[in-house]
Structures are given as C-alpha cells and as structure tokens.
Image (spheres, rainbow, N blue to C red):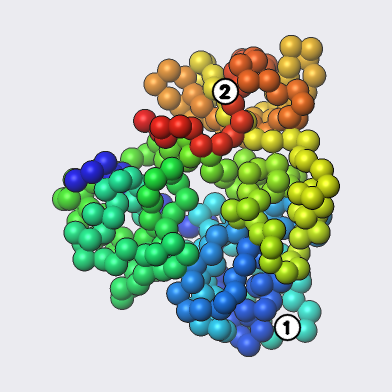
C-alpha cells in the first residue's frame, strides 16, 4: 500500500441546525457558499463577527433543506452556538449541541486504496459519503489526499482503527499531524488565526472565505480588504533550535520592536517548527527574531512547501 497515516481525534463542536429557515440563516452567517442546498453537500468555512474577525471554523454538512450538521475539530461548540444564537431574530431555527462522537483522519497517497480495501465509498470533493453509523468527507490536512471519518459511536471508530492497523496504516501523534498541516500551508483556527484576526491575514480568503457569494456577516470587511488594500499582517513559517516555547508568545526584531506573535510550535528532530502572525513589512525571510527565553528564524510566508512534509 502507498504511504498512508492515520490520526484519531474528537471534534470540539457538533451542532445540529434545523427548521424551515435553517438554510437561509446559515447562508447569511457562514463565510462560504452553501447553495445549492443539496443533501450530502459538505462545505468548509469560517464564522466571522461584525468586524470580520475569525471566531471559529467548521464544516457544514447538508442533510436536507431543513437539516444541517456542523462539525469543528478545534472550535468550541459554545463559541459557534453563541455566535449563531445572537443573530437569530425572527428566523425559525433550532440550534442544538450534540455529543461530539469520535473521528479519525486518513492522510497520504494510500488513503483512497485503504478506503476501498474497507469497502467504503470515496467521497467526492465537496460531498460526503455515508454508510450506517459513519460519515466520510475530504480533509484539509496535507498537500495530497486526506479524508475525515466521523461517527457518533466511539465503538465504530475503534473497530475501524483496528481494521486499518491490520492493513498496515500507521497511526501518528498530534504533533506529527500538525507538522504535515503546516507543510501544507493550512492555518489552524482559532489558535493561529482567531478572534483578533482577519481571514485575509491567515490565507483563508478564496478557500474558507468566499469573495463571490452574497452578503454574510463580516463580508463587507473581507471584500474591502481584498479590493482596496492588503493585509498589514500575515502568517509565517517559523523554526527554532531550542525546546518549543508555550504559545502564544510575543516576537521582537533586532531593534527590540514587537512585530508579532508566535501562535504554534511543534517539536521536530532538530528543534521545532511553528506558525507566527507577523507585521509583514518587518518580516524578512531568514531573519532571526527574539522571544523571552530564546530566538526563532523566519523560514518563509505561510504557504505550501514544495515537496510536502517528510
């Protein structure tokens, strides 16, 4: 079997949004296009506040014109639910928190083959595939193929993991998964781009944030930044040779001017790699920055690394 890794995890949020106004209400709040409201459609996007700042991210699965499922790996259910509830005015919408269930990711060239070996349908881009008790959709973890497999039953995922291990799938740590994601140039919400930040600062526009759909909360700010100006800050890939610091932590240039913040750091064989949000005009590739207790090197703008993660 071709190269493939597995990763077991739980979502931070699982919500059901139902009733006759559910579709149009979510369309007015979500950063990406949800239409047409076709059963089985799966869309990644973010949730913005009125100032266009990033509150959370998620996928939304359409299970019918009046039933939508929201799943987020890192953004809390309470945060997403509160954001939605405060904007319900006269809409007939029900928002219900659900048990998060269990999930695993398959990452690598062999992911399709592994799904076929298990007798599972490979989901198309932007859609889900289902079997009783299991939902599959495309992931955003690597430069190549990745899939998310979610179930409301922990036993289903335990059994699935055991079958994958028999197929030779190696299950890896959270840090290894994060390094693969960093190499793919995929920002993590809300740790790397969050409530103080704009989506244009985090390489989310065009992927997680639509420039062509109709009005949604925060859309005017997104459009203005895209059409009139450019972000003053951006995400950069950072490396260090000491032990990884606790994040977030302020970063300073050689003139002791604070130019940003280290948002994440993951251990590697030779030190660590991470992601920082920096003032772009002060961020020079190859330059060293200081933080309390150590120093870092700016490796480059946060975008996919040619050749991917090793």
Mark 1 or 2: in front is 2
Near-viewer residue (84 or 143): 143
| Residue 240 versus residue 170 in the image, above or below | above
Check the image and name the residue furthest to the top.
254
* Residue 91 at x, y percent in the picture: 73, 83
SS for dot 1: loop
Judge from the rendering whether residue 125 lies leftward or rightward of residue 3; answer left or right. Answer: right
**Gap in Å between the C-alphas at discs 1 and 2?**
48 Å
Judge from the rendering whether residue 91 lies leftward or rightward of residue 265; answer left or right. Answer: right
Measuring 34% from the left and 51% from the top, which residue is drawn there? 106
Is residue 98 something one can see in this rendering? Answer: no
Label 1: how many Cα within 10 Å (few below 14, some 14–19, many 20+)? few
Is residue 108 something one can see in this rendering? Answer: yes
Where is mark 1, residue-wise? 91
* Residue 234 at x, y percent in the picture: 69, 36
Rendered-image quadrant of the C terminus: top left
| Residue 263 versus residue 127 in the image, above or below | above
Measuring 65% from the left and 35% from the top, which residue is drawn there? 235
């Amino acid at each position: 079997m071709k190269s493939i890794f597995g990763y077991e995890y739980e979502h931070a949020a699982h919500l059901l949004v139902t009733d006759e106004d559910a579709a149009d209400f979510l369309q007015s709040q979500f950063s990406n296009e949800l239409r047409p409201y076709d059963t089985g459609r799966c869309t990644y996007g973010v949730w913005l506040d009125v100032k266009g700042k990033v509150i959370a991210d998620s996928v939304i699965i359409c299970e019918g014109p009046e039933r939508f499922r929201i799943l987020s790996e890192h953004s809390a259910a309470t945060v997403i639910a509160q954001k939605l509830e405060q904007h319900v005015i006269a809409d007939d919408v029900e928002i219900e928190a659900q048990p998060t269930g269990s999930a695993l990711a398959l990452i690598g060239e062999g992911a399709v083959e592994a799904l076929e070996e298990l007798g599972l349908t490979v989901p198309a881009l932007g859609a889900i595939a289902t079997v009783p008790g299991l939902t599959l959709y495309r992931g955003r973890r690597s430069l190549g193929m990745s899939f998310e497999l979610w179930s409301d039953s922990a036993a289903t995922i335990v059994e699935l993991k055991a079958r994958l291990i028999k197929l030779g799938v190696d299950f890896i740590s959270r840090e290894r998964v994060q390094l693969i994601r960093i190499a793919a140039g995929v920002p993590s919400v809300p740790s790397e781009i969050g409530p103080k930040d704009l989506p244009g600062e985090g390489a989310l526009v065009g992927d997680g944030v639509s420039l062509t759909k109709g009005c949604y909360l925060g859309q005017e700010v997104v459009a203005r930044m895209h059409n009139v100006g450019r972000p003053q800050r951006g995400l950069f890939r950072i490396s260090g040779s000491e032990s990884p610091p606790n994040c977030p932590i302020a970063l300073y240039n050689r003139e002791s001017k604070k130019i940003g913040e280290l948002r994440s750091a993951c251990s590697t064989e030779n030190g660590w790699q991470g992601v920082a949000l920096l003032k772009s005009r002060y961020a020079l590739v190859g330059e060293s920055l200081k933080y309390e207790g150590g120093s870092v090197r700016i490796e480059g703008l946060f975008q996919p690394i040619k050749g991917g993660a090793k």
